[in-house]
Amino acid sequence: MPGPTMFAPQCRVRRGAALTLVFAGVLAAGAAAGAFDADTDDGRTPAYGAPARTAARAVDRNAVDRRAVEAAAEAAAQNGRSGSEAAAEVVSRSGDSWGAVYSAREYEGFALALDGAYVGVGLTIRRTPDGRMEAGGVVPGSPAEHAGIASGDRIVGIDGTDVTGRPVTEVVSLLRGDRLRDGRSSSAAWGRPDGVGTSVRLELRRGGRRWERTLRRERLVTRSVEVERIGDGDGAGPPATLVKVASFTKGTGERVREAVAAAAPGEGVVLDLRGNSGGLVTEAATAASAFLDGGLVATYDVHGRQQALRAEPGGDTRRPLVVLVDGGTMSAAELLAGALQDRGRAVVVGSWTFGKGSVQMPSRLPDGSVAELTVGHYRTPAGRRVDGAGIAPDLAVRGDAEQRARTVLGGLGGGS
């Protein structure tokens, strides 16, 4: 069963709600079994769920007991009812904001997406405070880009279904074709090859313009890390290596370490975590290892028992470092930014981060479905709670954050 993840869908309890991770209509990656070094007291590894922006709130007093969920599912199954639907009812009544129940196939798809391959249309989804659905970003070369969809375009309907006010998970499910409107599963579920070529009709709005586009789902591969040398010879500040991390999928941490090792001696690094929805916490810890000589990255509690996530020794502790964050920086990305900030290793530039730091535990139900239930919270090395609070930047900026980052690097001695 997939282990700890820190992604950002809006998690509203419903049976069959597709896991919304980095991309909507797109699944960027997932969790790996045993990804934490330390297991929980019952031998399983906590999963770190992730909501898109809703009112982030602590759920300690509302978190549902796993045994109650399993008992409800088992009793329902014995009476010929759907165990997962009964479990979803218990989770919903508990008030656990991030609790969710997934069918066996949906959760299997979560595991199938570990390597960052998915079937989708290449859209990032976000929900505005008034319930509107917008494209948060468009994957280069994707069907969405070819259709002329741009960041900020409002998604009004999908295949004739009005999506205003719906949970992001449900919108993603419609985009991906995970479930048909009559509730039956479709062949496009969870990035399986037979979803390639299926079509989805989007109703869009941009300002006063309203139009429709029919897109065909493709098999896409995420590029979790992009590296670029910026400011070379422009005189506006010292050149730097820009490392943009879109999500913490499998292998991301090592790619960050390789990028840092390849940077020119003495040259500063801008670690761009803006819009990063999270991912595997162990990948975030590996990325932290590029800049730290071991030590604490985060602590987390499971049913009150505290455990630790640590960086590997041997990182570059001298290279000037600026971390860029914004309101789309979530979950594992927030832990990384918070760790580097608390450890005095980086100057964090940008705006307040999202604020998602609760721990979800996956639990297999009798019918093979999976319930993810809140069991604890993450904290930064200094003991700051991320959930509902986010990470405050050292330097709040508006406008050209990248240029400000280079200015800060100049003050830190980051030049070559």
Image (cartoon, rainbow, N blue to C red):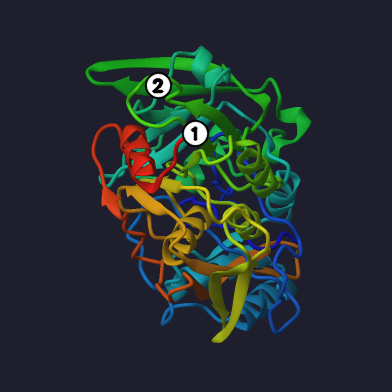
Q: Nearer the viewer, residue 57 or 38?
A: 38
Q: Is residue 154 above or below residue 51?
A: above
Q: Nearer the viewer, residue 302 or 199?
A: 302
Image spot of residue 306 (x, y percent): 57, 83
Q: Is residue 220 visible?
A: yes
For the point 65% across and 56% down, the residue is 286
Q: Where residue 150 is drawn, which disc sits there?
A: 2
Element at label 1? loop
Mark 1 residue type: Ser
**How many other residues sit within 10 Å of disc 2, few (<14), some (14-19) or many (≥20)?**
some
For the point 53% across and 26% down, the residue is 139
The answer to which quarter of the image holds residue 57 is: bottom left
Q: Is residue 161 visible?
A: no
Q: How many numbered tags mark residues here?
A: 2
Image spot of residue 308 (x, y percent): 60, 75
Q: Is residue 156 above or below residue 388?
A: above
- In the figure, is residue 139 to the left or right of 239? right
Going from the N terminus, do you reach mark 1 or mark 2 first? 2
Mark 2 residue type: Ala
> Do the numbered discs 1 and 2 sit on residues whose CB atoms are within 8 Å?
no
Q: Where residue 416 is drawn, which disc sits there?
A: 1
**How many other residues sit within 10 Å of disc 1, few (<14), some (14-19) or many (≥20)?**
few
Image spot of residue 263 (x, y percent): 59, 36
Q: Tell me the CA gap for discs 1 and 2.
A: 37 Å
- In the figure, is residue 237 to the left or right of 12? left
Q: Considering the image in quadrants, where does the N terminus appear?
A: bottom right
Element at label 2? loop
Q: Nearer the viewer, residue 302 or 361?
A: 302
For the point 63% across and 56% down, the residue is 315
Image spot of residue 395 (x, y percent): 28, 50
